[in-house]
């Protein structure tokens, strides 16, 4: 096979693989948005078939020959093809080190584990989930050892979600956060009565909230020709390509900020996907660089932009007018402070900006100690509860709202959590970096999201997966240093809570 | 390959082919219900790939060997496998005559054409759609010529929707209808003032109409666990399997009967799909026998059941109560007569029962002349308008309400229209046949749809595609004879219009 032949065959295969993946994603999206409830069986069967076809296509002898041919002539390829081939080689090498029966066992175990977790969470019955949880950790570790025999297995597991992320980085990061944030969290808790968010719990009609979502998406510059908002129980973003991104939210009549910030968060993910390089679309490189980089965009939009004074001044007049009289007794300053109310709580996905990373830290510490063998699955509820008491000052009433709350461990996404916190913390450095080029919050005040989005596209979004996440971040902001994020949080919450 | 091996391989392939078809249908459904409008390109590409994969799989040398092996031992197969293989042999022969690139081009063209048609209709801009329309006709004819080189290409195109239907049958059928119905239509028109449907044009809030749709679907016995109602510009039904059927409607605040009868019509299609034999699901035999048989169910439900006095007495109390005071001055008899008001009109899908077939006839005549080359796409608006004047006596004010109204040509469903009229006419014979077993309209009056659906399931629905349409219809009703339908229409409209 010549390089030219291999390139042509590669292009044809890429198109077919993309179609199978697009189709599978569509069936998933339909399942959570529109499908009648008795239709899960047929979707499972079709998804299984599409997965099988993708697997066969991407591991066929012909594919391996195509990849090898191109790998052996890699210097002749353009930068995009070079990246595709080096990624394909890496992925093939890693997956081929894992015995097939281990992968099959793991796949079966994850399916069972997820099903048992759903029931265990509903019943708040940790004991029924415990053996599955232990096996999920054991198998994740085993697979990490196969994939990367020379790496620490927890580092290798994190690497699956955030290439280059290590325990060393995480330990320093979480220590820095803990040291600085725990005193701030305590100080805020001592002055909890300074912020009253009761007006946010008034009745905000869902029909109006839908209009507000459209208003906010418009403000953010999300192109409605390529991104629409759906409604699901749990908000999420799914990208079919940069030309078709879907985000979802969930409306609660008595908790309107919940949907508002879901829309802004998912909108941040969507903007990223909508602006990945067109030349990368339909390939493995079209999409966000990593989980942490993705979360760094969604949480930057949600919290740093969306919960800023300047953003409030953009949306407050609309809200006051359209939801009258709900905000008649609420000033713009009151509104800003109440959407930033911080309060230690049980559920990670509902945590405020200040306490959020503590939730993640608990999970990180537990994962790490499970990998060393210091903890067993049976020890997790007690350790979870102890750490929530120590870092957040709260008692966990049951495992449903404790160790059983997230689906990640049940589904085998072990090593994923740290990305959420790292992504949040990246935001601290983005602020400073953007301010060197223009005044970020002045742009927000003016509603000049074209400028903000233009900057993010130029520095981050357009690269898709062309770069690894750490080099990408460093190319923009230099070395990661948590102190910027800590300073941002301290300044903001000192202001919100009028701390001395 | 032994018969046993071939059977096993056939089962595996059937599953894969079903998955590809399911995925393609899902992408289509998403495109018309949820997708952002700038996403047609990526859907076209994926649909093209899925079509290519289906084509390759269903025409691969291995498939041909499987089919040949089973065909050569066909007497040993059970009746379902026997039908599958004889259908596969027929379909393989037809499809293998069409070059793969023609099919892929056609699939991509249809997706684009549908997107352009949506915009063209919105803007009433025929010119932007015209080149796509011409290409759709050209390619449909070309594919028909490939598939059936020895048949007239328009007959071959009709055969795709209604096996065995020819211009000869249609010409005679439409002539018979025209001869009998035109005098009746004229008589009704002369007494137009006897039925006043102004109360149906009052404001019926969409939110209540949505509740009414659920009420009607409940009455009809449509299982909500397996069938949901969506909203699209043009109502339609799509079946993924008998476990997942979607129907859609379009609400107009000032024309509530429009959605009411769309729901009943599409509900009739849905009931058929939901009751095809379980043993046929996921195979080429799971689904309705043909378009005319399908339309004979939907139009039987819409008009013969849904516009009967007995059905009115089921829904009138609900409507009077929920939409009060809209129907305060309308008796049940008034209501029955106004939902049967007959009036030459512009839009086929909103045409009354009596004039409906004239709309179909216009399309049939135009399709036939497009195939002979006598007409080009550019001629269609003028010819359309001329024929509407001639047969229905009305002026077409714009192409949106004229030649651009239906999606069929945009989607490549050319040769499909005659089935609507044939299917409508079948209903006349169903009434007489059911009345031999039980009193159809007494069952409607009692809301005993379980009995009606049970009968239709037993005589028609459960067979799926086990039988060809003509033998299926004849096994239930004997020879098709349009006079039963004509008699039904004459009796009904003589009653509604109090004709002497």
Image: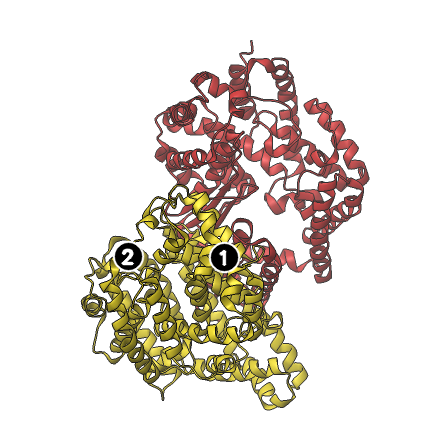
Chain colours: A red, B yellow
**Mark 2 lies on residue:** B121
Q: Which residue is located at x 43 percent, y 69 percent?
A: B295
**Whole-number angstrom distance, CA of label 1 to CA of label 2:** 29 Å
Residue B106: image x %, image y %? 37, 70
Is residue B196 at least partly visible in the picture? yes
Instruction: State the count of labels.
Output: 2
The quadrant of the image that shows the N terminus of chain B is: bottom right
Toward the viewer: B15 or A238?
A: B15
Q: In the shown orientation, is residue B128 left or right of residue B203?
A: left
The subunit carrying tag 2 is B
The subunit carrying tag 1 is A
Residue A178: image x %, image y %? 65, 24
Q: In the displayed image of the protein, which residue is found farthest to the front? A: B500
Q: Which residue is located at x 53 percent, y 56 percent?
A: B219
- Where residue B400 sits, quadrant-wise, is bottom left
**Mark 1 lies on residue:** A22
Toward the viewer: B43 or B463?
A: B463
Q: In the shown orientation, is residue A299 left or right of residue B335?
A: right
In this rendering, is residue B499 above or below A22? Answer: below
In this rendering, is residue A356 above or below B254? Answer: above
The quadrant of the image that shows the C terminus of chain B is: bottom left
Toward the viewer: B373 or A351?
A: B373
Q: Which mark is residue B13?
A: none
Mark 1 Cα shell of 10 Å, populated few (<14), some (14-19), many (≥20): many
Q: Secondary structure at mark 2?
A: helix
In this rendering, is residue A422 above or below A81? Answer: above
Q: Secondary structure at mark 1?
A: helix
Residue B82: image x %, image y %? 59, 84
Residue A192: image x %, image y %? 60, 15
Toward the viewer: B313 or A271?
A: B313
In this rendering, is residue A133 above or below B280? Answer: above
Q: Nearer the viewer, mark 1 or mark 2?
A: 2
């Amino acid at each position: 096979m010549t390089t030219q032949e291999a390139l042509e065959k590669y292009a044809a295969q890429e198109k077919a693989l993309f179609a199978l993946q697009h189709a599978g994603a569509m069936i998933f999206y339909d399942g959570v948005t529109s499908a009648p409830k008795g239709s899960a069986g047929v979707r499972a069967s079709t998804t299984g078939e599409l997965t099988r076809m993708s697997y066969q296509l991407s591991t066929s002898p012909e594919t391996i020959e195509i990849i090898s041919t191109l790998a052996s002539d890699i210097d002749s390829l353009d930068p995009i093809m070079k990246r595709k081939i080096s990624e394909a080689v890496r992925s093939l090498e890693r997956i081929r080190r894992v015995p097939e029966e281990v992968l099959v066992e793991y796949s079966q175990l994850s399916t069972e584990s997820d099903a048992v977790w759903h029931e265990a969470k509903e019943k708040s019955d940790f004991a029924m989930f415990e053996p599955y949880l232990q096996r999920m950790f054991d198998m994740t570790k085993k697979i990490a050892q196969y994939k990367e025999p020379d790496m620490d297995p927890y580092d290798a597991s994190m690497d699956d979600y955030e290439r280059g992320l290590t325990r060393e980085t995480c330990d320093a990061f979480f220590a820095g956060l803990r040291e600085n944030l725990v005193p701030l969290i305590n100080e805020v808790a001592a002055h909890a009565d300074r912020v009253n968010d009761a007006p946010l719990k008034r009745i905000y009609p869902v029909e109006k909230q839908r209009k507000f979502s459209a208003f906010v998406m418009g403000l953010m510059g999300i192109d409605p020709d390529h991104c629409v908002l759906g409604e699901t129980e749990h908000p999420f973003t799914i990208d079919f390509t940069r030309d078709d991104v879907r985000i979802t939210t969930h409306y609660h009549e008595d908790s309107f900020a919940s949907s508002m910030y879901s829309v802004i968060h998912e909108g941040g993910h969507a903007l990223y996907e909508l602006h990945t390089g067109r030349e990368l679309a339909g390939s493995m490189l079209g999409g966000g660089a990593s989980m942490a980089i993705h979360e760094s965009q969604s949480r930057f939009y949600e919290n740093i932009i969306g919960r800023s004074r300047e953003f409030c001044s953009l949306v407050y007049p609309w809200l006051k007018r359209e939801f009258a009289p709900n905000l008649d007794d609420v000033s713009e300053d009151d509104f800003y402070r109440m959407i930033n109310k911080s309060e230690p709580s049980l559920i990670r996905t509902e945590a405020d900006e200040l306490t959020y990373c503590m939730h993640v830290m608990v999970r990180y510490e537990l994962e790490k100690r499970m990998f060393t063998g210091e903890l067993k699955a049976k020890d997790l509820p007690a350790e979870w509860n102890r750490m929530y008491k120590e870092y957040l000052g709260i008692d966990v009433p049951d495992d449903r709202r404790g160790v059983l709350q997230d689906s990640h461990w049940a589904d085998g996404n072990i090593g994923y959590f740290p990305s959420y916190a790292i992504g949040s913390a990246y935001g601290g450095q983005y602020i400073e970096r953007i301010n060197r080029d223009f005044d970020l919050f002045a742009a927000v005040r003016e509603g000049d999201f074209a400028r903000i989005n233009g900057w993010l596209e130029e520095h981050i979004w357009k690269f898709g997966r062309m770069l690894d996440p750490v080099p990408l971040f460093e190319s923009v902001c230099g070395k990661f240093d948590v102190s910027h994020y800590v300073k941002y949080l301290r300044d903001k919450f000192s202001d919100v809570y009028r701390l001395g």
